[in-house]
Image (cartoon, grey):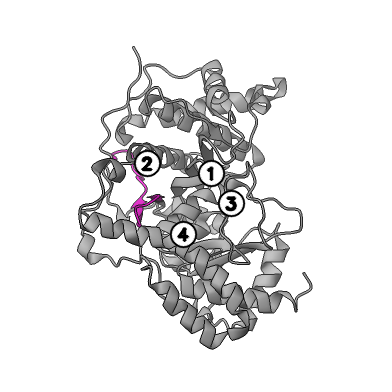
C-alpha cells in the first residue's frame, strides 16, 4: 500500500488576531524620507546611500504594493496560495527534525553525524509522501558516500534507529506513518534519490537543508535563484531572553532536572515565511507526545523591535570560538557606536530567531579571507527577515546572491542582519568607519 500524507490545510494564518499585530512593511515612499535624512546627516556618503536606497526599494516596495493589491481584491487566490502547500509540508518536516534534539545528547561528533543523516532521511521521506509525484532535490553539506563506507556500519545502524523513532511520531504531525520500519538500504536509497542532485544556480527549483545541530535546523526553497520560502527550527531557543547568557551545557542539565513546559525557558520554536506575504510567523515546538500539530499550530506573527539607535540595540554575538574575527571586530564596533547593552550570545542560525523574537536587533558575521558562506546557512533566515520587514545584506549594503551555486558569492567583508532599514543603514555606516581603523 502506498504511503500518503493526511490532508494538509495550507492556508496561512491571516485570521489569527490580525488586528493585534503591527505590520512592519515599508511603504514605497519611505525611501525619499530616508534619503532626506541621509543627505542631511551624511552628505559625503550620499552616492552610496542612493545605491543603498535603490536596492532597498527594489527589495521591499513590491511587498507594500502586494498588500495594497490584496486590500483591494486585486490578488488572485492562486497568487495567495503560491507555495502554501510546500510551506505547510516544510514546517511539519522541521518540527519533526527538531524532535531529534530531545533524543540525542550531542556529546560527540558521532551524535552530530547521526543528526545530519537522520534529518536528511526524515525530510526526504516526508517530502516524498506529501508532495506527490513532484521531483525534488535537496542541497545539503554531506555526501551520502560517507554513510555507505564499510567503517560506517555503526553510524548507519544508529541513523536507522533514530529515523524510525522519529517517523513513528508522524501521525501527531498529520502525516501517515510507515507501515513497517525503514531499513538501511531504504534510507540510503532515499537520501541518494533526493539529496545533492542539484548544484544550485540561477535556474531551476531546489531545496536547501542546513547541517542540523542542537541549536537550529533550516529548510528553504529556492527557485530561479530567489529564495521563495524558509523555515527555521530552533529546538533549544530559550523562552526567556536571560537564559541565553548561560552556557548551553548548564541549560541541558536544567532541562533534565525540570522537563520543559509551555511556561519554561526551553520551549523551542519554528519560524517561517514565504515570498510576497509581507509577514513571518513563529510557532512553539510540540514538546510532548500527546501534542498534535494542527495548522497553524498557535502561530503568531513575527514583530521586530522598533529600536533604530545602534547604541540602544542588542547585538547577537556568536558563541562559537572558531571565528575570532567576528568577536574582535564586533567588540570594537560596539565601542565605536557607544553600545550600552551586553551582547546576546546565540549559537549558529538561531541568531535569526533571536531577532524574530525581539530579543535582539541585529547580528554581524565577519570571517577570514577565503571563507565561503553557504546558501543553506542563510536562505531561511534571509526570507524570514525580508518578509517581516528586516534586512540582510553584506557589509556594503548589497543584497545576498543565492543564484551562484552552493556559495553566496560576492560578499563584501561579512553579513549584517537587522530589524529595520534605519538601524541597518547606521550599522553599515559604523562598519565603514570602524573597518579602516581596524587591523583586519
Quick one: 354 or 241, which is closer to the camera? 354
- Find disc 4 in the rendering and name its residue: 59
| First in sequence: mark 4 vs mark 1 | 4
Which sits earlier in the primary sequence, circle 1 or circle 3?
A: 1
Q: For the residues carrying marks 2 and 4, which lies nearer the camera in this image? A: 4
Of the two numbered discs 2 and 4 on the same chain, state the one appearing first in sequence: 4
Say which mark, if any, is on residue 87.
Answer: 2
Residue 59 versus residue 206 in the image, above or below: below
Secondary-structure class at tag 2: helix
Depth check, mark 3 against mark 2: the one in front is 3
- Look at the image and say whether residue 278 sits in the magenta stretch: yes
Residue displayed at 55% across by 25% down = 191
Q: Name the residue at the right extreme.
A: 439
Apparent side of residue 369 relative to residue 226 in the rendered image (left or right): right
Q: CA distance from mark 4 to mark 1?
A: 14 Å
Q: Secondary structure at mark 1?
A: loop
Residue sitting nearer the eye, 154 or 414: 414
State yes or no: residue 350 in magenta. no
Query: Which circle's residue, 3 or 2, is located before the other in the chain?
Result: 2
Magenta span: helix, strand or loop, mainly? Answer: loop
Amino acid at each position: 500500500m502506498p504511503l500518503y500524507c493526511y490532508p494538509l490545510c495550507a492556508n496561512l494564518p491571516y485570521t489569527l488576531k490580525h488586528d493585534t499585530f503591527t505590520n512592519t512593511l515599508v511603504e514605497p515612499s519611505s525611501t525619499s524620507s530616508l534619503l532626506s535624512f541621509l543627505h542631511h546627516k551624511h552628505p559625503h556618503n550620499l552616492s552610496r546611500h542612493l545605491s543603498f536606497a535603490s536596492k532597498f526599494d527594489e527589495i521591499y516596495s513590491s511587498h507594500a504594493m502586494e498588500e495594497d493589491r490584496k486590500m483591494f481584491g486585486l490578488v488572485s487566490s492562486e497568487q495567495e496560495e503560491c507555495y502554501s502547500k510546500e510551506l505547510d509540508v516544510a514546517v511539519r518536516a522541521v518540527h519533526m527534525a527538531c524532535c531529534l534534539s530531545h533524543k540525542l545528547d550531542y556529546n560527540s561528533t558521532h551524535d552530530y553525524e547521526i543528526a545530519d543523516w537522520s534529518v536528511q532521511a526524515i525530510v526526504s521521506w516526508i517530502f516524498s509522501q506529501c508532495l506527490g509525484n513532484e521531483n525534488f532535490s535537496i542541497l545539503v553539506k554531506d555526501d551520502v558516500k560517507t554513510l555507505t563506507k564499510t567503517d560506517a556500519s555503526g553510524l548507519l545502524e544508529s541513523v536507522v534507529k533514530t529515523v524510525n523513532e522519529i517517523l513513528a511520531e508522524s501521525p501527531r504531525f498529520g502525516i501517515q506513518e510507515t507501515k513497517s520500519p525503514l531499513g538501511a538500504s531504504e534510507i540510503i536509497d532515499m537520501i541518494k534519490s533526493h539529496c545533492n542532485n542539484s548544484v544550485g544556480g540561477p535556474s531551476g527549483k531546489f531545496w536547501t537543508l542546513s547541517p542540523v545541530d542542537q541549536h537550529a535546523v533550516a529548510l528553504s526553497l529556492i527557485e530561479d535563484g530567489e529564495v521563495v520560502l524558509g523555515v527555521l527550527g530552533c529546538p533549544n531557543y530559550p523562552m526567556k531572553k536571560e537564559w541565553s547568557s548561560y552556557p548551553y551545557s548548564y541549560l541541558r542539565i536544567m532541562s533534565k532536572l525540570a522537563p520543559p513546559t509551555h511556561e519554561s525557558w526551553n520551549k523551542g520554536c519554528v519560524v517561517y515565511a514565504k515570498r510576497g506575504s509581507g509577514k513571518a510567523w513563529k510557532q512553539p515546538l510540540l514538546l510532548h507526545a500527546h501534542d498534535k500539530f494542527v495548522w497553524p499550530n498557535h502561530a503568531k506573527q513575527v514583530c521586530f523591535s522598533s529600536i533604530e539607535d545602534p547604541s540602544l540595540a542588542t547585538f547577537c554575538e556568536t558563541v562559537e570560538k572558531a571565528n575570532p574575527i567576528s568577536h574582535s571586530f564586533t567588540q570594537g564596533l560596539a565601542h565605536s557606536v557607544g553600545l550600552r547593552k551586553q551582547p546576546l550570545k546565540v549559537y549558529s542560525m538561531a541568531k535569526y530567531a533571536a531577532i524574530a523574537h525581539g530579543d535582539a536587533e541585529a547580528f554581524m558575521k565577519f570571517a577570514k579571507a577565503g571563507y565561503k558562506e553557504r546558501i543553506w546557512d542563510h536562505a531561511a533566515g534571509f526570507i524570514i527577515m525580508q518578509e517581516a520587514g528586516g534586512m540582510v545584506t553584506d557589509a556594503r549594503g548589497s543584497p545576498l546572491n543565492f543564484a551562484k551555486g552552493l556559495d553566496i558569492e560576492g560578499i563584501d567583508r561579512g553579513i549584517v542582519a537587522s530589524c529595520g532599514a534605519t538601524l541597518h543603514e547606521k550599522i553599515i555606516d559604523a562598519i565603514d568607519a570602524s573597518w579602516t581603523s581596524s587591523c583586519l
